[in-house]
Image (cartoon, rainbow, N blue to C red):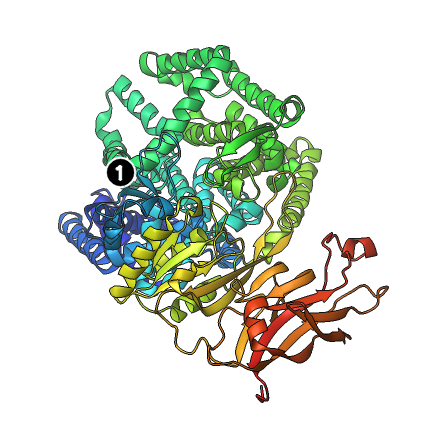
Amino acid sequence: MALLAGLTGIVGYGVLQSLSGPRRDASPPQDPVELILLLVMTGCLVVGWVGVTLLQLGWFSPARTLCIALVLAASAASLGWHCYGMWRPAVSASRYTWLLIGTIGLGAALFMHPAEFVLGGGDAGVYVNLGSAWAETGSFTLTEDGLAELSAELRPGLFRAPQEGHVAEAVRLPGFYLMDSERGVVTPQFFPLHPMWMALVNGCAGTALSLYATPIWATLGLACVVAAARTMFGYRVGLLSGVLLVFVPLQIYFARYPTAESLTQALIWFGLYGLARFDDEGGRHWGIVAGLAIGQVFLARIDALPVLIVPFLRAVYCARRAQWRHELWFLVPFLVLFLQAVYQSLVLSWPYTWEIYGSLIRYGLRMLQQYWPLVAVLCAMGLFAFYLAAFRSVHVLSVAGTYWRWVVAFLVVIISVYGYFVWPVTGEMKLSPYWYGDTSIPVTNHLNMVKLGWYMTPLGIWVAVLGVAWMIGTEPWNRIWQMLCIGLSFTVLYVHNIMNNPYHIYAMRRYVPAVVPFLTVGIAYGIVRLWSLRVRWRATGWLAFLCVLTLIPWLCFQGRAIWTLSEYSGLYSQIRAIAHRLDPHAVLLFDDAPPVGVGATVGTPLQYGYGFTSFDLQEADLSAAALENAVADWTSQGRPVYWVVGPEPVLRPPEALSPRPAFGVWLDTTVMERSYFDFPDEKLAYRVPLEFYSLASHGTGDACTLPYHIDIGLLDSLEAASGFYDKELLGVRTVRWTNGDGLVVPACLPSELTSTATVEITLATSRSTTLESSGVQVWVGAETFGGFALGDGFQTVAFSVPVAELKAKGVRIVSDTWVPKEHGVGNDVRSLGVLVDSVTIAESGDDN
């Protein structure tokens, strides 16, 4: 990772060698940390553009991307050295330098604990596994050869039908559209820039280290926010913005969570930093890097349209004043990348574009019908602003203190008061259909600003609002309008409608790229301005100090569950262990009831991260005959087939396919709670049992030899016939509770065993101290084989039974029951019998 960072810095220096132009001696000294930021970010912009371009052409590989970027940098450096001589930028360290290093170091220390989100079914896991796939294939579009061989009768049982009105043929797995089953063409859902970086790091250092790409981008984003705020408002606002941003829970959480928000944040704020320096100093390299950064935002996210306001208004300004020559240093690189993003949207990512913007168009039409007067007012204001910019002197907009600027500032405060105090009272929750989860979700957009205050604190929200209003009313407009356009537009957009499944903390990712940094800059600006008034009014200095003294501990308290959270810790190694236990080229058939179950979550990394073939069975549409034919075809090709049973299976492995137990596992890790109505502050255990059964002739081996062990709670779907609750992980044991009458039927006993067998059952009772220990009776058919009194802890009971009865009737474990909640033990309302750990069948007299 250090080598990769160094390479990007070298690329950045080579490119800037030619871009910095002939007037190098006139350039003001730069802070050394900001100079390093400029070099690294410029190198990242060049490497990112090369990587995405190669990916779109189908020629991507980590080595090829880095080699091309280095060649481009070397060529640019040679050209620049030949024309202008060696570029030796002047640097000047100060107290700001060391404080900036401390702020970035603190951020890095908090961010570098990435979530091991390698599961599919969520955006983060799709990004990670897409990076793994692209590191191998090198093409944006994926081709799976085996899909073309599937019969038309079988496909409905293997692929989920798309949402009504969607252009994809089917959903291969969540995040992957099946576009042409005849050729096996699969199109990833998301835009390419972020997963391309995951692929680049994955190809250089592996999946585990690719998870660190997001924390590194978050650290760069933090530095970009500080640099942008310092350029616009001075070093005090810049540093305070950075310190506050480090402690915002959303920044910490999504710095560890492998989605595109941190990358987008770095690109937006580096673009704003470059534009501020471009407007102040006029160096063409600032315009070029700003154009590259703002343009790449559109290759990272599909919802970046508000960012278009900035280049559009700058183009209008240049058209009005006919000053294109200087502005083209920004507009040309931006336009090139924006057109590349349009190509990505309309050609390569067309299904995703249709899904997002088709729904937005429908939503916009509904909004137009409901709020047409407000829309008319906003359109009139927009036309008036365009008139001022295009046909009147732009200096009208740059005069500080004019009344209309305070009118705008007042409107910001009024809208904020409405969003925080009025709308939560007058609005109401609505249930909205959620196709992805095949359910309905509560939509509470009227509470969005209040919930944003959960993470920014209510004090932070209102200091930010007042700081932004103060900024609008007093700061030179030409220094702040670009940040205001992006910050206010994204804030208004997502506070009005979060446009996401609104469970927390996940839903708050929308605010990370622009809104959270914008609000922290507003907080810092308001506090610094208060501090600057202390000479005139001493109380303002104390008020500013009190705000800082209150805000930082409050932010730390709000992030109390996040500071020590390493979400999905250990999951990568658990998935890798499963992959190592599977035979090469295996086909995996996942049986689980939820529309996004283990077939999506576990099947995705095994498919795209490890090269197996995974199918999430659509049980209601599955043709048994077609499946049997497909399994026969796969096995004839030498491909082992596994039936994978999830926590909520719908079908048993078909008897005609001779299922045999292969192995069972539990995925065991920790996640943040998912809450729709409360602040999430609890860490929950994520425990998912998986059973792998070999189908057809594969793996039969000695499966039917004695002793035959049934691990209840791990690999028991074929044997735990009835009377058992769901599997549980109890320390190192895997167990199930009975409901008082549990039936275990051995799935496989040797045919030559004709006399009697010894059955050993390991079980326990776990009851309230007010209850006596449970007694257990064991039945085989209509005959009882005695009663057993259970003491404390697990114990093993043994008895001999006729094999013929055992094969036909199985073993019933009968006990009395109790309800924990009725006896003051937790909230469990189940009627519980005993805990069963295992059943072992051996020949009579066997030493087992």
- Say which residue appears at 51% left-offset and 15% top-offset: 370
Q: Secondary structure at mark 1?
A: helix
Depth check: give the residue in front, 471 or 577.
577
As displayed, is residue 198 above or below residue 358?
below
Asked which quadrant contains residue 260, the reply is: top left
Q: Quadrant of the C terminus?
A: bottom right
Location of mark 1 (residue): 344
Between residues 792 and 429, which one lies in front from this camera angle?
A: 792
One can see residue 380 in this view: yes
Asked whether the viewer can see residue 39, the reply is: no
Q: Position of residue 289 (x, y in %)?
A: 30, 42
Q: Where the N terminus falls, by quadrant?
A: bottom left
Residue most extreme to the right: 770
- Locate residue 449: give its quadrant: top right
- Give the percent coordinates (x, y) of residue 721: 57, 61
**Where does the image place residue 631, in percent across and percent down from the top left?**
32, 59
Q: Residue at x 74, y 70 (%)?
A: 776
Decide which of 162, 668 is in the foreground and name it.
162
Say which residue appears at 62% left-offset and 49% top-offset: 559
Q: Is residue 128 left or right of residue 61?
A: right
382 to the left or right of 746? left
Q: Residue at x 24, y 52 (%)?
A: 149
| Place of residue 13 in the rendered image (x, y in percent of width and height, measured from the top left) | 27, 53
Name the side, left or right, on which 162 lies relative to 182: right
**Residue type, numbered disc 1:** Gln
Within 10 Å of the Cα at label 1, are there few (<14), some (14-19), or many (20+) other Cα atoms? many
